[in-house]
Image (tube, coloured by chain):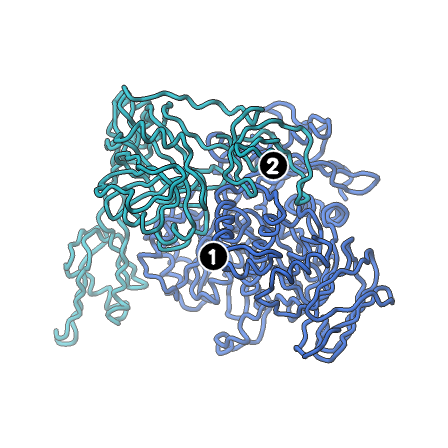
Chain colours: A blue, B cyan
Amino acid sequence: MNKSITSVIITDCGSTTTKARLFEVKDGRWRFVARGEAPTTVEAPLADVTIGVRNSIIELGEITGRKFLLDKDIPWNHDLFDLYLSTSSAGGGLQMLVCGAVAKISAQSAERAALGAGAIVLDVISADDEREEHALIETIRRIRPDITLIAGGTDGGAENFVVSSAELLRAAKPKPRFGTQKKGSVIYAGNKSAAPLVKHILEETCDIQFTQNVRPSIELENIHPVREAIHDLFLTHVMSQSPGYDKLLSWTPNPILPTPSAVGVVIEAYAKRSNKSVIAVDIGGATTDIFSVFKDAAQEFQFHRTVSANYGMSYSIAQVLIEAGVDLVARWLPYKISESSLRERIRNKMVRPTTIPQSFDDLLLEHAMCREALRLSLDHHKSFATELSGQKKERTIGDLFLQKSQSESLVSMNSLDCVIGSGGVLSHAPHRGMAALMLIDGFRLEGVTEIMVDSAFLLPHLGALSEVMPEAAIEILEKDCLVPIGVSVAPSFRFRKNITKVATVFWNGEEVGTVEAGKIKRVPVSGNGEIAVEPVFSSVDVGNGAGEKYVKSILVGDEGLFLDGRNRPILNKFSPESQLEIHRSLGIL
Amino acid sequence: MSSSLTPRLFISSGCILERKRELPIEGEILVKKGDLVNPNSVIGVTKLEGEVALLRIKDQLGISINKFVSGLLVKEGDSVLEQDIIFNQRGPFGLFSSAFKSPYSGVVEFISESSGTIGIRLPPKEFKLKAYIAGEVLNVEQKKSATIEGRGGLIQGIFGVGGEQIGKLIALDVGIDQRVSVEHLPLQCDGCILVGGICPSSEVLLKASERGAVGFVTGSIEDASLKGFLGYDVGIAMTGSEPITMSVMITEGFGELNLHGHIMEIARLYNGSEASINGTTQIRAGALRPELLIFPEDSKLNMEPIEKDKGFYEGARIRGTREPYFGKTGTIKKLPVEVELLETGIEARVAVVKFDNGVEASVPRANLEML
């Protein structure tokens, strides 16, 4: 720990709300102390992000009784705190267009780089795109990306695909969303032999920067330099043009991270430090971010992030309903509802996103929507978080086109150690068991999985802090941010007639319950201890393979163990009566 | 959290309206400060750059890059007409020539000697910016924008589809709680903006559009009807560029909800007046709501200034915006300071409301909007 810093204020400038958090050393340990919030002010008429930042810190001051801000010219009262940091997703965050040669190779690697840098990827264009060229040009003009990333071609390999991408960009002349500069920003991370030609094609229409090839060979993916280039360009070109950001940048000695990038930093750090495979989800009003850290075949931790830009709980809630369908939403409800009533309630939530559920039925409907948003987002994430990620593998060209060996997902629910939920619907669920059940059902958890929530929306802030003081960030994460809810025990098995008992569960050596086929129930244990799960018959997989016992030291939250015998995959159809029974058995209703 | 605006949608029979009208790219603003305009007045023009069409000649003709270069008949900056031969390559002994005719008229933007592609910049399209409101030009930013101030009626909606349209307001002869049917529609709707009723079916909307209506304002709509009218489900609350000729604005919400009585009063008062509608909706930071602006003759205009936001107060008229009081109107009796624990286990600041149907209840303030 840096001995000279004992008090830090960090803000996260979200699309709607700017959230200030105070962290200080108390009794020799870093702790979360207080929070303040204010509407984000990046849009007209105020158009200055620092106004919202100041307001949130003023509220922080009112809560703590300390005046952190002085006057406009010299914002900080450095007698009261030592360091200010910030993250941002305001103004829609970093929005990118990705161009690659082949959708499943360079375009996908480029997209991973963009997402890893915290961007929202507006579109991915590849040479094997099915859309007509005029439609692609129109799309590029319309979406106005902050940064366009061009990738494609191995070093020394074919140049024509990447030249096509450059020509499309030249034709479209993408204009930035913010700022007075007329040219769009481009990063080239493709075949280095084609770089001079790309420069010639684009230098008059775009501001172009060059970095290492994201896919220097078929077998190798080299994401890190691209992510750094994106981040640097984001700060210098995009953020500095956004209203008030040049002032905000001058207030902090450290770069401002895009919010999703900051969350990813702290999740990755937590997973590596605790040696756990982790899925973290941030489900917001418009988007669902999923972060995963899993070990690859070489036992190295690999981090992936996806943004499901159209799966959220308010602005895009109707899109979740369209993609999931009424039946899959209604299956989670312990009451009957007509299709038209369900659709209209969701539409009204879409147009009045700040309303809150007052009746229990309405709350449970939101929770049902959350399950489907989680399910859809995880499926999207799984298809993206694949094996190829920076590790050189012996692979032939033929392998690339075999569906089985190419792009196997790293996300294995059976080997998942821990799931972390964030976002209002999860963090503020009135009963922690509700949050647990949404994560179990939405993510279809398998095996033995710890379930936690971010109780105070600290993840972005801790990500920023971990860039400066990583130990402090982890200390606060474990003490004040992550709240353990419970542990899910969800075996999968081959169906047998007349079976009732699937597995026996032991806690610290004592039998505490059984997993019963078709049912889910709660066992009230908590704290640190050893869990053991024994399959009853040979096809039951409780996390270590069919028929194998599972034993692990684990932390169980206050809601205890959720013994889920409903099998995997979860049924598409439940009756309201069976859902009512589930909710009652878990103490939710 | 610091103060936030009290949820409300504006309805006024007459208020000051100010709009900044901007060209998409620099052009020419045709008005000056003090000029009087009406909604259809063209106040600015610009040329939108034509697209670049890519002609992949080398690939289409299956020739080498050397042959592409040697056969070029144009250079960068040349103007070409449709059907002009822009490439010609003679085969051995002068036989079997490969000629390429330009499918477009335009200007040669670039020639790529690596991919054998010619980019033709198509002719620019003229864009005319209309005033959209009636009033006086307050301010002009040369080449960019003009700010216009006028007076007229304002009706804000909760959700809409379609962009700006200008037309004649027609108040439909239908009750505020009555479903609009085809029989309620005028036989001729050319250039009309129809206002009234609730829950028009997709058949009604399509018929109105077919008869020439450019706008439709109604209290509520069923989800399936909107889908039937558009041809697809709207998933994200961001609209305004749908390929439709009639913009639709809903004032109350989805389901069966009565049209606000004052909206119908205003529509009847100003029946036949010039009006502008914009169905564009964006529900995020910097939210945009759809709107209907009405410009009656000065002698008919009934000014009703919009009050400044006072926040919720005892005696305020409100409407519920979430179950179980969705659409119900009432009056605030009390505003407790302490948070209340709701049935759902959520803590929230509430208002005690006496609804018009006699029921008195605690309702989260987040689930109310000012009438």
Is there any visible trace of residue A290 in the rendered image? no
Q: Nearer the viewer, residue A21 or B359?
A: B359
Left or right: where does residue B333 sit relative to residue B84?
A: right
Name the amino acid type tagged 2. Pro
Label 2 neighbourhood size at 10 Å, few (<14), some (14-19), many (20+)? many
Q: Is residue B94 above or below residue A312?
A: below
Q: Nearer the viewer, residue B295 or A218?
A: B295
Residue linked to disc 1: A322
Where is residue A414, by image quadrant?
Answer: bottom right
Left or right: where does residue A39 sit relative to residue A123?
A: right
Q: Nearer the viewer, residue B233 or A31?
A: B233
Left or right: where does residue A584 sit relative to residue B312?
A: right
Q: Is residue A54 above or below residue A276?
A: above
Residue A551 position in % (x across, y down): 80, 69
Q: Nearer the viewer, residue B219 or B142?
A: B219
Q: Can you tell which mark lies on residue B364?
A: 2
Chain letter for mark 1, please: A
Is there any visible trace of residue A57 in the rendered image? yes
